[in-house]
Image (cartoon, rainbow, N blue to C red):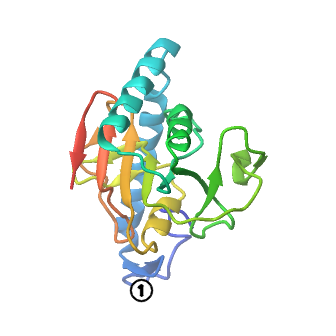
Amino acid sequence: MTEDETGGGTAPCFAHLLVDGHPVDPETARDVARFRRSERARLIAARALSSEERERATAALVTGLDRIVTLEADMNVAVYWPIRGEPDLRSWMERAHAAGARALLPVVVEEHQPLEFHTWSPGCRMTRGFWNIPVPADREVHEPDIVIAPLVGVDEDLYRLGNGGGYYDRTLARLEPKPRVIGVGFSGCLLPTIYPMPWDVPMSEVLLSDGTHLKR
C-alpha cells in the first residue's frame, strides 16, 4: 500500500478503513490521493529544467546545506540517490564523507516496509536495488542523525509530497531518537497544503533552491 492509496475498496457498511493502522474515511482518502497524484505529476514535470538551470539550482542547494548543516566527524547523514529529476546532491555527500561524517543512502529492503540506511562512500561498490535505484552493495546499517529528504512538493506546515510510496513517512515515524529531517527541492514546489493524513510526518526544516529555509 502506498502513502496515497487505500489498498482497494471497503464494504459500504463500514464508515472507516485502516491505512497503516490509522482509521481513515475512505472518501477522504480517495480525494486526497487524487489531489496528490495530480500535483505530483505537475511538479515532476516542472523539474524538467535546462542543464544550466539545474546546475545553478543544485549549486544553490549545496550552498544552503553548507550554511545550515555543520558536518562533524562520526555524524550519520542520510542523503539519497537522485531519481526522476531530483536535485543531485552527490557532491555534498562526498563533502560530508570528506568531513568525517558517515554518509548513508536509504535502501528499500522489503516493499512497503521501513527503509534501512546503508553506508556509502565515494567509489564504493554499488548494486541495483528496488526499482533499479543504485544502493551500496555492502549492507552496513546505521541510523541517521540527519536525513536529507528529496521533495516533489511540500506544504506550508512542512508536510512532504514524495513519490507516492510512503517510505520516508513509514521510516521516520519509527526512528528513535528522531533525526533532524531536512526536505530539499527546487523552487516552485511549495504548496498551501497537501491535506496531511494521519500517517504523514512533517519535515523539521525545508530548504529550496531559491534560498527559502523554513522551520517548524
Where is residue 178 drawn, in percent x and y?
Answer: 38, 69
Vertical order, 38 against 12 (above or below) = above
Residue name at image x 26 percent, y 51 percent: 193
Residue denoted by label 1: 14
Q: Is residue 37 visible?
A: yes
In this view of the protein, which residue sits in the foreground, 68 or 60?
A: 68
Residue name at image x 66 percent, y 65 percent: 111
Query: Counting other residues with Cα less than 10 Å from the Cα at mark 1, is it few (<14), some (14-19), or many (20 or more)?
Result: few
Q: Which image quarter holds the C terminus?
A: bottom left
Q: Which corner quadrant of the image does residue 125 belong to? A: top right
**Callout 1 amino acid:** Phe
Q: Is residue 189 visible?
A: no
Vertical order, 111 against 17 (above or below) = above
Residue name at image x 72 percent, y 62 percent: 139
Q: Which image quarter holds the N terminus?
A: bottom right
In this view of the protein, which residue sits in the foreground, 113 or 215?
A: 215
Q: Secondary structure at mark 1?
A: loop
